Image (cartoon, helix red, strand yellow):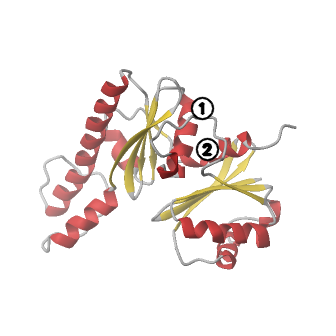
Amino acid sequence: MLLAIDVGNTQTVFGLFEGADLGEQFRVGTDRTHTGDELAVLLRAFVDLASLDGIVMCSSVPPLVREYEAFAERWAVADLLVLGPGVSTGVPIRYDDPREVGPDRIANAVSARERHGAPAVVVDFGTSTNFDVVSPAGAYVGGVLAPGIEVSMEALFARAARLVKIDYVEPPQVIGKTTAGALQSGLVYGFAGQVDGIVDAIRGELGAEAPVIGTGGLVDLIAPHSRTIGHVEPFLTLEGLRIVWERNQPPK
């Protein structure tokens, strides 16, 4: 059994694979202070550690990589592959400094190309909203970074004393009849419009109608209102990690 781990700035997503099949998945808040021993206590609630054949991960929080290495060595006794420079992905990286690219973005590009071909655009709704682009030649060529939904709304609430926090749900109508409804409308239709505008610009620069794959924690809120997102795959990053793991195993 393979454990795939996507460590984000806000949340960490885990997935258990039997071969190519994703079984259990679970999501927890990312705690930058966790030690390897604490990670073992956390994961034992979800996973039979003795059943693990391997662990593959990407992390947006570099200090936690060391703790996952300690966890894998002491508690899981399983090989750990950390997606980063030097790891074979099968996707050429056409970026000025490839070390600057977040490993989760590479995992998304790997999965998008494998599942949808090239070109492709991934929109990942996380702490930031990431747009990642696979060229018609199948290379990762960069993307766009924009403030994420929750970060943007938290900033608005912090600066506007009369606005109250809202649930992240679809508004009953576009024209809000309450402050909460107006905020929800701005959130949903504002971010959907941002996605469509950026995707249109990316497609124009590529010179191709690349399919768009939406992923991330809030994709189900925005995707129904976007005309460009054609596929919703909440666990795209985990699938990309699985593919990277398989591409780095010795031939049988």
Label 2: few (<14), some (14–19) or many (≥20) C-alpha neighbours in 10 Å: many
User: Front-most of 70 and 4?
Assistant: 70
Q: Name the residue under label 1.
A: 114
Identify the residue at horizontal 54%, vertical 44% (top origin).
106
Q: What residue type is labelled 1?
A: Glu
- Report the number of numbered marks: 2
Q: Image quarter for residue 214?
A: top left
Q: State which tag comes first along the sequence, 2 or 1.
A: 1
Residue lying at the far right of the rendered structure: 252
Residue plotted at (60% across, 43% down)? 240
Which picture quadrant has residue 16?
A: bottom right
Residue 186 placement, left or right of 217: left
**What is the three-letter code of the residue carrying label 2?**
Glu
Query: Can you see residue 168?
Result: no
Whether residue 97 is visible to the viewer of this picture, yes or no, is yes
Residue 129 appears at what percent x and percent y?
Answer: 37, 50
Q: Tell me where residue 94 appears, x and y as whole percent.
A: 49, 36
Task: Give 174 or 30, whichever is nearer the viewer.
Answer: 30
Quick one: SS at disc 2? Answer: helix
The structure residue drawn at horizontal position 52% and vertical position 74%, both measured from the top left corner, is 32
Q: Which of 245 and 89 is in front in this view?
A: 89
Q: Describe residue 169's horizontal placement relative to residue 67 as left or right.
A: left
| Quadrant occupied by the C terminus | top right
Q: Are marks 2 and 1 in contact (CB under 8 Å)?
A: yes
Give the Cα distance between marks 2 and 1.
10 Å
Quick one: label 1, few (<14), some, or many (20+) residues within 10 Å? some
Please give the residue where the numbered disc 2 appears in the rendered image: 239
Between 194 and 98, the residue placed more toward the observer is 98
Instruction: Name the mark on residue 143.
Output: none
* Residue 113: image location, x then y, percent: 55, 32
Q: Is 158 above or below relative to 144? A: below
